[in-house]
């Protein structure tokens, strides 16, 4: 079953293809117009603007905090009843050095604030923070997808793995279009491994 969408697509595989094509085009537009540089860096408000720009042509919920509980595999993301508070706490987290920035990224991944499209949006958000604070970004082509998946899966308990993995992939090519787009091309890194489950969980 495909998520309800503005394109009227009911086949999940077809929706995934259209979503990838459209979100890549909108991501490139963010970069080339300089619009990305006008968004708040390191806040949910800034992330929501990124998400809305990427997915506004596809989903009614683009840029909006999710209203359902979701899980991937055996991992449940932040329950809806705690999501707003979690995002406020993430906004307040420091981001003055690499370790702080990755810890903030990990917490945003645990929050997973949107119904779909969290990975792509949050990678752009992460690189915007890195660019502003330490004049570096991640070259995602140098990040092994399996290692990334496992490190992110374990990151709520231990952040050492994901920090090492991403630190080794840092580049000073912060204004390079190809480097920027690799984060979008890498959409399979977290979103492609399994389908989100919407859970009818009691808020307890």
Image (cartoon, rainbow, N blue to C red):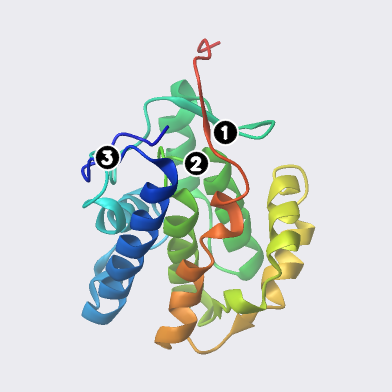
* Location of residue 187 in the rendering, given as x and y in whole percent from the top left corner: 51, 61
Q: Is residue 143 left or right of residue 147?
A: left
Residue 189 seen in render: yes
- The picture quadrant where one finds residue 46 is bottom left
Contact, CB < 8 Å: mark 3 with mark 1?
no
**At 52% from the left edge and 51% from the top edge, which residue is drawn?**
93
C-alpha gap between disc 3 and disc 2: 19 Å
C-alpha gap between disc 2 and disc 1: 6 Å
Residue carrying label 1:
77
**At 49% from the left edge and 45% from the top edge, which residue is drawn?**
90
Label 2: how many residues lie within 10 Å, few (<14), some (14-19) or many (20+)? many
* Location of residue 79 in the rendering, given as x and y in whole percent from the top left corner: 52, 25
Residue carrying label 2:
112
**At 49% from the left edge and 35% from the top edge, which residue is drawn?**
86
Label 1: how many residues lie within 10 Å, few (<14), some (14-19) or many (20+)? some
Q: Is tag 3's residue or tag 1's residue first in the polypeptide sequence?
A: 3
């Amino acid at each position: 079953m495909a998520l309800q969408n503005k394109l009227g697509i009911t086949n999940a595989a077809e929706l995934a293809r259209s979503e990838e094509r459209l979100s890549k085009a909108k991501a490139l537009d963010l970069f080339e117009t300089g619009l990305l540089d006008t968004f708040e860096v390191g806040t949910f408000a800034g992330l929501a603007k990124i998400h809305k720009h990427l997915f506004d042509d596809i989903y009614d919920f683009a840029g909006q905090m999710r209203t359902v509980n979701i899980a991937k595999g055996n991992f449940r993301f932040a329950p809806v009843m705690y999501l707003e508070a979690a995002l406020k706490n993430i906004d307040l987290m420091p981001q003055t050095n690499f370790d702080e920035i990755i810890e903030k990224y990990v917490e945003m991944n645990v929050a997973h604030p949107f119904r779909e499209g969290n990975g792509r949006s949050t990678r752009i958000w992460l690189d915007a923070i890195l660019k502003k604070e330490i004049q570096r970004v991640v070259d995602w082509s140098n990040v092994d997808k399996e290692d990334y998946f496992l490190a992110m899966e374990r990151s709520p308990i231990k952040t050492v793995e994901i920090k090492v993995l991403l630190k080794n992939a840092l580049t000073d090519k912060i204004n390079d279009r190809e480097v920027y787009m690799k984060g979008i091309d890498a959409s399979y890194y977290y979103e492609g491994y399994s389908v989100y489950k919407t859970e009818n969980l009691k808020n307890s």
